[in-house]
């Protein structure tokens, strides 16, 4: 007798099979017990009919507790009433590991409680679906960049310099030298682009910010492409193609997960339509002012309500172009006709999910960059290697960073970015 996974039930209709699973939930109705089973691939129902099994098996089915692991034997049947489409008619049950007083019951729990039990919360149907979408986004990321001629390069996690200032960095003592947990791999990816042309990194990044919001994490994963001989407009095309590719692949390969989450697929389909709209920072400020936002002035960064309003003014993700120089990092290229803005863009997701990409064309003038480093109060010696890139065959180049967890939150349509991480890393658990 073959042992199968739940996701493959469609290939075994009418066959008697074995499945290793956990009991996610159960209910009884007189002479029938319904077991909600999961095995890591999907969820479906197993039906135990008293007249079709031994008295011992029926009694065992009624006594099973939440998250008890079992080997169940039965016949795969079509079930048109369920979204999954199949169920198991049970013949035998073997208990593998008992479970008692499981802390996450079907009742409502707060996010903090669930994150404290994240190692168990992952077993829920919604979290299972989110992890399937996370896996698909990661798979599609590698596919997109590999198909477009990018080379993956791994920047260091411990760094000696800060790409965006030191106010939100985790500092550590590295053999009597200051070092920082990586805030971004971007500067190193610029060096890699000068060697390999088009590169991307995919790794953990850190922000020492006490921001406990539904959008922010202290440790998260970032995808950071960097492209030599590429100006900002070309980079924007890569960015929108990449995001649309991720959305389309989730639509193509995560139908079951999207159904579990109740995500509107028609809305997602709209996010694959290119090009994405573009609006300048200047026009975005004007749009907000015209619509009653008197809490922001030109030169200030957007808050969550501002980004949400701007994004909701369009029906797809929107690029906000050319922010004020004073609120952006030192490495961005100055605008050719204005001294107060730089050539950059943030991609704002609709439905209130905020910024998912930040990118820019990079400054290439050695003297300009040195001046910016000095004005930012950064250590020139620590950035000598970065300045070397402008001394030895510099070229126009652009890049961007996409936050993995926030993008998953947006595509999956979930409420909180912490639901998009597999486990609550230490840094995301202990901060006030």
Image: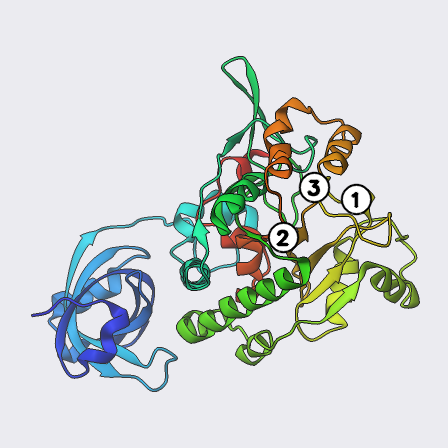
Tell me, yes or no, if residue 31 can be seen here: no
Seen at 54% across and 35% down, the residue is 427
Considering the numbered disc 1 on the image, is that residue within a helix, a strand or a loop? helix
Q: Residues within 10 Å of mark 2 (few under 14, many from 20)?
A: many
The answer to whether mark 2 and mark 1 are in CB contact below 8 A is no
Q: Is residue 431 left or right of residue 106?
A: right
What is the CA distance from the residue labelled 3 to the residue labelled 2?
Answer: 11 Å
| Residue 366 placement: quadrant | top right
Dot 3: within a 10 Å radius of its alpha carbon, few (fewer than 14), some, or many (20 or more) residues? many
> Which of these two is toward me, 378 or 385?
385
* In-front residue for pair 319/351: 319
Q: Which residue is mark 2?
A: 398
Name the residue located 80 percent from the left edge and 30 percent from the top edge.
375
Q: Position of residue 139 (x, y in %)?
A: 40, 60
| Farthest-out residue, top | 176
Rounded to the nearest angstrom, the CA distance separating label 1 from label 3 is 12 Å
Q: Position of residue 275 (x, y in %)?
A: 64, 74
Residue tagged 3: 331
């Amino acid at each position: 007798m073959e042992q199968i996974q739940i996701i493959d039930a469609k290939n075994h209709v009418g066959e008697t099979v074995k499945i290793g699973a956990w009991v996610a939930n159960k209910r009884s109705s007189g002479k029938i017990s319904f077991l909600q089973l999961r095995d890591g691939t999907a969820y479906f129902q197993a039906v135990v009919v008293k007249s079709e099994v031994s008295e011992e098996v029926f009694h065992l089915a009624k006594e099973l507790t939440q998250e008890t692991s079992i080997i169940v034997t039965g016949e795969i049947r079509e079930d048109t009433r369920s979204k999954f489409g199949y169920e198991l008619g049970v013949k035998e049950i073997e208990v593998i590991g008992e479970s008692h007083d499981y802390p996450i019951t079907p009742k409502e729990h707060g996010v903090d409680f669930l994150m404290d039990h994240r190692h168990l919360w992952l077993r829920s149907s919604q979290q299972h679906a989110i992890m399937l979408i996370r896996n698909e986004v990661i798979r599609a990321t590698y596919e997109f960049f590999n198909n477009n001629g990018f080379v993956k390069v791994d920047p260091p996690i411990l760094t000696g310099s800060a790409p965006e200032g030191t106010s939100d960095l985790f500092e550590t003592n590295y053999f009597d030298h200051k070092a920082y947990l990586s805030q971004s791999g971007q500067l190193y990816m610029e060096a890699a682009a000068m060697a390999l042309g088009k590169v991307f990194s995919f790794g953990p990044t850190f922000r020492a910010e006490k921001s406990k919001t539904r959008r922010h994490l202290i440790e998260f994963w970032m995808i950071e492409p960097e492209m030599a001989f590429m100006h900002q407009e070309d980079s924007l095309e890569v960015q929108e193609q990449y995001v649309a590719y991720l959305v389309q692949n989730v639509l193509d390969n995560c139908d079951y997960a999207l159904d579990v989450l109740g995500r509107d697929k028609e809305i997602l389909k709209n996010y694959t339509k290119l090009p994405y709209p573009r609006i300048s920072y200047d026009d975005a400020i004007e749009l907000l002012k015209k619509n009653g936002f008197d809490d922001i002035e030109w030169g200030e960064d957007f808050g969550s309500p501002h980004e949400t309003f701007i994004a909701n003014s369009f029906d797809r993700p929107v690029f906000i172009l050319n922010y004020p120089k004073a609120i952006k990092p030192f490495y961005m290229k100055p605008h050719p006709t204005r001294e107060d803005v730089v050539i950059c863009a943030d991609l704002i997701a609709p439905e209130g999910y905020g910024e998912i990409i930040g990118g820019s064309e990079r400054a290439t003038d050695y003297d300009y960059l040195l001046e910016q480093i000095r004005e930012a109060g950064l250590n020139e010696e620590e950035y000598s290697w970065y300045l070397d890139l402008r001394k030895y065959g510099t070229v126009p180049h652009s890049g961007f960073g996409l936050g993995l967890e926030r993008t998953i939150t947006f595509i999956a349509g979930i409420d909180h970015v912490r639901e998009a991480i597999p486990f609550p890393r230490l840094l995301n658990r202990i901060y006030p």
